[in-house]
Amino acid sequence: MFLILVLIHEFGHFIAAKAMGVRVNEFAIGFGPKLVRWRWGETEYKINLVPFGGYCAMEGEEEASEDSRAFCNKKAWRRAIVIVAGAVFNIILGFIIIGATLLPKERFATTVVAEFSEEAISNQSGLAVGDEIIEVDGRRVFTTIDLGYMFTGIKGNTVDLTVLRNGNEVFLDDVEFKTTQVDGINVIKNDFWVAPQAKTFGTVISQTFKTGLSYGRVVWFSLVDLITGKYGISAVSGPVGVTEVIGSAAKQSLSNIWPIMALITINLGIFNLLPLPALDGGRLLFILIELIFRKKVPEKYESLIHAAGFILLIVLMLAITAKDIWALVV
């Protein structure tokens, strides 16, 4: 899975580089010693021993070059397109996977309350059958994925809901639910079922985009909630933790892997666009600075900043990996 996700990312850079007239010296699948290589035109293609990701090596990407087709010598907007393309391909892949997983379904879940369970208490706080939940604690809701995230990590046992009732928005203050603890995080025990939506061509398209949007919003809200302290570092997982989740899902059913893969690839796309050194978003930030001030940031300073950012990311990754391994051992 990681091989596919990283390869799609690098393929996005590759396609955009070719389209923008940038010389691509190498395109490789995997790392380490080469198993197979061949040349097609100006680009050397490789399949390497370690099947984890890959890379797209462009002329003038990391160093100065006199070649007119080098990355460093292209106009800023062309370089920006090449930089952004990797993340865009990841996000597009996520939407494709979501659409493929929705196609076999006969109906889709909505956020309309259809029925309450026998032990329900939220209906005693004003929530009613037929209400379409559109906001939870001020955050917009589009799908049950949004509901699941908004109902996680709450303080106490109440949330503010905005519902659509008979065509009018109604604000419900302090709707009470029963809660439970999952890995130390307070989670609402949902006490109602939602109404289904029939599958048509239109609903497949709309649900695909809504689900993709929800995945992206979950990624964004997760980052915001980490920064603001709603969740601690214990809630973050690296490759080891993610692999454990994927393995557990696969043991139940291989079809469970696809939604996780869609979430991860959208996560990868969004995270890579964050304006942080060593990420695509960090490189894009320097290009935007160049466009605004009509002058490049000196290469030595940009390289130092990216190197420092890369070291910090590696340290963070090692810390999270150690935490994940410790959780598995203990």
Image: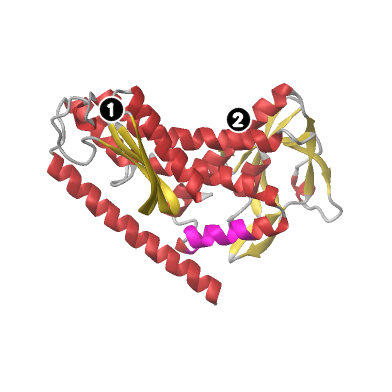
Q: Is 328 left or right of 269, judged from the image as shown?
A: right
In the foreground, 9 or 291: 9
Residue span colored magenta: 234-247
Residue 213 can be seen, yes or no: no
Q: Residues within 10 Å of mark 1 (few under 14, many from 20)?
A: many
Residue type, label 2: Phe
Q: Is 19 left or right of 116, judged from the image as shown?
A: left
Q: Main secondary structure of the magenta part?
A: helix
Any mark on residue 186, and which?
A: none
In percent of width and height, residue 220 lies at 48, 43
Q: Is residue 124 above or below residue 266?
A: below
Q: Residue at x 66, y 56 (%)?
A: 249
Residue 89 can be seen, yes or no: yes
In reply to whether residue 237 is colored magenta, the answer given is yes
Q: Residue at x 75, y 42 (%)?
A: 127
Tell me which numbered mark, 2 or 1, is placed earlier along the sequence.
1
In reply to whether residue 70 is colored magenta, the answer given is no
Q: Is residue 328 above or below residue 36?
A: below
Q: Which residue is mark 1?
A: 22
In percent of width and height, residue 108 lies at 75, 35
> What separation in Å lies between label 2 and label 1 (alpha carbons)?
32 Å
Q: Residue at x 42, y 33 (%)?
A: 12
Any mark on residue 209, and which?
A: 2
